[in-house]
Image (cartoon, rainbow, N blue to C red):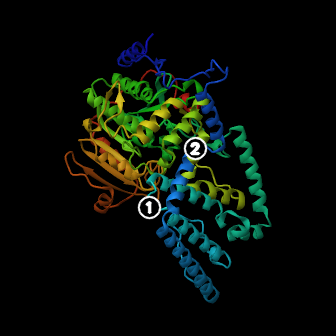
């Protein structure tokens, strides 16, 4: 049966108004260019083809370099080094800075000898750098150690930035790598140069180091065995996370669709379909009950449907980005439409799921499909011109290197993906963990969010390649050049109102990039900027301390406001952003009605796919 026939059968079945459970197999048809290629043999030499050999070598190298392309790094370094070598003015400036910093450090040492701890620092760390915040760092000689390190770090920042002629991408790469190398040699990372570790070691007689060694061995064994971190077993989907009552009402080869059980006497007439990213498991939006956004919505009278994605393996290597739209999002939308045949749907997408939702919404608008009542994009990018530090890993050389690595195994592995995100915040996610776990011997209590973060997923070879090239490299969606069913889609065609959420410390989807949604569609766009990061900023239930947000609506046809001006003009509000969004949803969800009947069940939530490892 052809792919077109399968799709037609899928659409027909999911639009039925019967309550029969639906479980389907919907094959995808990859083009030959990206399909899996068996090793080809050269007729003359009787060996594998040159391209296959190249791919195998690149894949082997990738395992040694954590997926980073040596060619890309060398190209960036060469660009920087050559331009610095022919810039005597920059060299003189750096020499001058080195002399000034040396004199500053000498003056600081002299002041410390006279005033002791009362001496003012000669350089302050960045606000997010907490490595030297303990008072022990102001004791001699640790004050000189950490001040010298910070001055060195600042000098290298000056050395790797603003070199005339260096491309911005190469400048960012060189600066990033220099920062990573310096972070390795931070005095906070070594027993002899960290006063907190020394004090704890003397106080406990070395018991902290013993605990740290035991924890290191336990973590190493779990890493080798592919097990989740210690304590993750306390948070198992269906037992103490992802426990909001519901049923799986649809399943195909890519998704399970969960319908949550109504918990109020009346519900809003228009349902909500949530599209999480498949780079993560859906239950970040349904963690423990106190942190569950799904539970929060259901308790306030919303009928919620959730997509749970299959965790792909090597057999899914040829799933495409459009397969995720077609047999993922659109299949779910068709099923919800069949269950609510006369009602529009409020759709919400998180991270990559939001990008997919925006793609589908633009295609639906192009085709005059008016089923979407509103669109919510949570930490989701549609324009990748300012995609943040993640774009450091994205250029033609790097993408080809990743493609070759994925070509061999059929997917991007969870460890490879997690490594890239950890590098973006190495102080928080690598070195601070080394300090607490292995040097101080502290075992932090596992939380539902930490356990979810460790329960990672894979990314199919073809889809991830298309995403990196089409979105990050070429920015096709924002440029109106992304193709859906052979025709381009344009974000400006979207007419459903949009609610977009960015978070202040997001290193995956920087809020200034998320804010670009206010530039493209010709519709009302409400933009909300919340405190926190990519995950913790979204999981922000009412009652948590230190939460705040800003929110404002740009009406259709109103002038664009750049991010800095938007922040200056938008007052800050205290508390969680969830009530603000829920009130907006309620205004777009129709009147209250009797709860609808649940769809025929294929099994209780959270379903089967979320349990795949």
Per the image, label 1 sits on a secondary structure element best described as loop
Q: Residue 603 carries which label?
A: none
On the question of residue 345 being in view, the answer is no
Look at 66% across and 78% down and name the residue there. Answer: 139
Callout count = 2
Q: Name the residue under label 1.
A: 164
| Quadrant in which residue 497 is drawn | top left
Residue 405 position within the rendered picture, expressed as x and y whole percent measured from the top left:
59, 35
| Residue lying farthest to the left in this orientation | 557
| Quadrant in which residue 435 is drawn | bottom right
Q: In this view, does 441 lie to the left or right of 239?
A: right
Q: Going from the N terminus, do you reach mark 2 or mark 1 first?
A: 2
Instruction: Depth check: give the residue in front, 477 or 371.
Output: 477
Q: Residue 69 carries which label?
A: 2
- Using the image, determine if residue 327 lies above or below residue 4: below
Residue 538 position within the rendered picture, expressed as x and y whole percent measured from the top left:
44, 48
| Residue lying farthest to the bottom in this orientation | 114
Look at 38% across and 23% down and name the residue there. Answer: 335
| Quadrant position of the N terminus in the picture | top left
Instruction: Depth check: give the residue in front, 335 or 613.
Output: 613
């Amino acid at each position: 049966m052809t792919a077109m026939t399968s799709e037609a059968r899928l659409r027909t079945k999911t639009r039925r108004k019967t309550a029969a459970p639906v479980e389907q197999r919907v094959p995808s048809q990859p083009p030959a260019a990206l399909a899996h290629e068996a090793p080809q043999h050269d007729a003359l030499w009787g060996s594998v083809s040159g391209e296959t050999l190249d791919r195998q070598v690149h894949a082997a190298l990738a395992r040694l370099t954590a997926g980073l392309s040596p060619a890309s790094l060398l190209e960036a370094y060469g660009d920087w080094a050559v331009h610095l070598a022919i810039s005597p003015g920059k060299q003189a400036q750096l020499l001058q800075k080195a002399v000034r910093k040396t004199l500053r450090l000498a003056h600081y040492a002299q002041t410390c000898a006279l005033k002791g701890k009362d001496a003012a620092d000669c350089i302050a760390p960045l606000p997010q750098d907490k490595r030297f915040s303990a008072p022990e760092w102001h004791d001699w000689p640790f004050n000189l150690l950490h001040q010298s390190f910070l001055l060195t770090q600042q000098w290298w920042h000056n050395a790797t930035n603003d070199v005339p002629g260096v491309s911005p991408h190469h400048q960012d790469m060189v600066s990033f790598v220099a920062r990573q190398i310096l972070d390795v040699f931070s005095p906070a990372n070594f027993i002899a140069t960290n006063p907190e570790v020394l004090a704890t070691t003397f106080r406990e007689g070395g018991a902290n180091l013993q605990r740290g060694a035991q924890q290191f061995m336990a973590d190493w064994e779990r890493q080798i065995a592919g097990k989740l971190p210690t304590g993750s077993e306390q948070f198992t989907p269906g037992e103490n996370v992802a426990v909001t009552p519901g049923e799986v009402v649809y399943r195909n080869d890519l998704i399970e669709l969960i319908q949550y059980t109504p918990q109020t006497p009346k519900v809003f007439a228009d349902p909500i379909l949530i599209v999480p990213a498949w780079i993560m498991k859906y239950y970040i939006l349904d963690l423990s009950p106190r942190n569950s956004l799904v539970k929060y919505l259901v308790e306030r009278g919303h009928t919620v449907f959730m997509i749970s994605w299959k965790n792909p393996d090597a057999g899914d290597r040829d799933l495409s980005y459009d397969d995720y739209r077609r047999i993922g999002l659109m299949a779910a939308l068709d099923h919800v439409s069949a269950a609510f045949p006369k009602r529009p749907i409020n759709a919400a997408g998180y991270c990559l799921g939001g990008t997919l939702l925006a793609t589908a919404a633009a295609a639906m608008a192009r085709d005059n499909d008016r089923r979407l009542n509103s669109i919510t994009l949570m930490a989701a990018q549609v324009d990748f011109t300012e995609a943040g530090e993640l774009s450091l890993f994205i250029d033609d050389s790097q993408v080809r290197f990743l493609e070759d690595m994925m070509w061999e195994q059929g997917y991007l592995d969870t460890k490879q993906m997690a490594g890239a995100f950890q590098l973006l915040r190495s102080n928080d996610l690598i070195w601070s963990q080394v300090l607490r776990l292995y040097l101080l011997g502290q075992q932090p209590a596992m939380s539902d969010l930490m356990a979810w973060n460790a329960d990672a997923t894979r990314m199919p070879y073809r889809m991830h390649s298309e995403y990196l090239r089409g979105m990050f490299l070429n920015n096709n969606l924002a440029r109106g050049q992304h193709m859906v069913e052979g025709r381009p889609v344009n974000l400006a065609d979207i007419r459903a109102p949009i609610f977009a959420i960015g978070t202040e410390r997001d290193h995956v989807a920087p809020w200034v990039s998320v804010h670009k949604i206010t530039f493209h569609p010709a519709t009302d766009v409400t933009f909300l900027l919340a405190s926190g990061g990519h995950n913790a900023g979204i999981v922000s239930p009412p009652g948590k301390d230190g939460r705040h947000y800003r929110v404002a609506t740009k009406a259709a046809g109103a002038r664009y406001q750049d991010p800095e001006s938007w922040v200056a003009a938008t007052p800050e509000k205290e508390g969680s952003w969830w009530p603000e969004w829920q009130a907006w949803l309620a205004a777009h969800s129709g009147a209250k009605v009797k709860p609808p009947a649940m769809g025929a069940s294929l099994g209780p939530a959270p379903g089967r796919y979320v349990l795949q490892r």
